[in-house]
Image: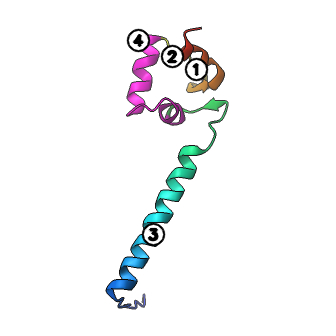
């Protein structure tokens, strides 16, 4: 049997806890956004790196615009330096 406990917070405590949680969530999101991207990236990572709305956009760029991709065991990988050169038009 699971035991539950009800905690009653005052409006001030509730507001303080909510602000603390929101600030922590923003901090975690900022850390993830500001983290350096690895030299070899997955489809999800390259989508974030290029600030695309979805991974489908990554596949469209591969097919239509020549976004450089390497496949390892059938899994697409993206070399950051090659993608950067592609972005610059090199």
The mark lying in front, picked from 1 and 4, is: 1
Horizontal arrangement in the rendering, residue 18 relative to residue 31 (left or right):
left
- For residue 45, the mark is none
**Magenta stretch?**
44-65
Q: CA distance from mark 3 to mark 1?
A: 36 Å
Q: Quadrant of residue 45?
A: top right
Q: Residue furthest left?
A: 11
Compared with 61, 4 (above or below) is below
Q: Nearer the viewer, residue 63 or 25?
A: 25
Q: Are marks 1 and 4 in contact (CB under 8 Å)?
A: no
- Badge 2 local density, few (<14 within 10 Å), some, or many (20+)? some
Q: Secondary structure at mark 4?
A: helix
Horizontal arrangement in the rendering, residue 15 relative to residue 32 (left or right):
left
- Badge 1 local density, few (<14 within 10 Å), some, or many (20+)? some
Q: At x 43% / y 77%, what residue is drawn?
A: 17
Q: At x 46% / y 17%, what residue is drawn?
A: 62
Q: Which of marks 3 and 4 precedes in the sequence?
A: 3
Q: Are marks 2 and 3 in contact (CB under 8 Å)?
A: no
Q: Secondary structure at mark 2?
A: loop
Horizontal arrangement in the rendering, residue 22 relative to residue 74 (left or right):
left
Q: Are marks 4 and 2 in contact (CB under 8 Å)?
A: no
Q: Quadrant of the N terminus?
A: bottom left
The mark lying in front, picked from 2 and 3, is: 3
Residue 26: x and y in percent read: 47, 57
Q: Secondary structure at mark 3?
A: helix
Q: Quadrant of residue 3?
A: bottom left
- For residue 64, the mark is 4
The mark lying in front, picked from 3 and 1, is: 3
């Amino acid at each position: 049997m699971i035991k539950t406990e009800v905690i009653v917070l005052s409006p001030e405590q509730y507001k303080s806890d909510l602000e603390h949680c929101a600030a922590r969530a923003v901090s975690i999101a900022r850390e993830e956004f500001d983290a350096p991207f690895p030299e070899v990236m997955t489809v999800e990572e390259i989508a974030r790196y290029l600030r695309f709305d979805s991974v489908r956009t990554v596949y469209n760029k591969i097919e239509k615009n020549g976004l450089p991709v390497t496949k390892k065991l059938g899994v697409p990988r993206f070399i950051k330096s090659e993608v950067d050169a592609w972005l610059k038009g090199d």
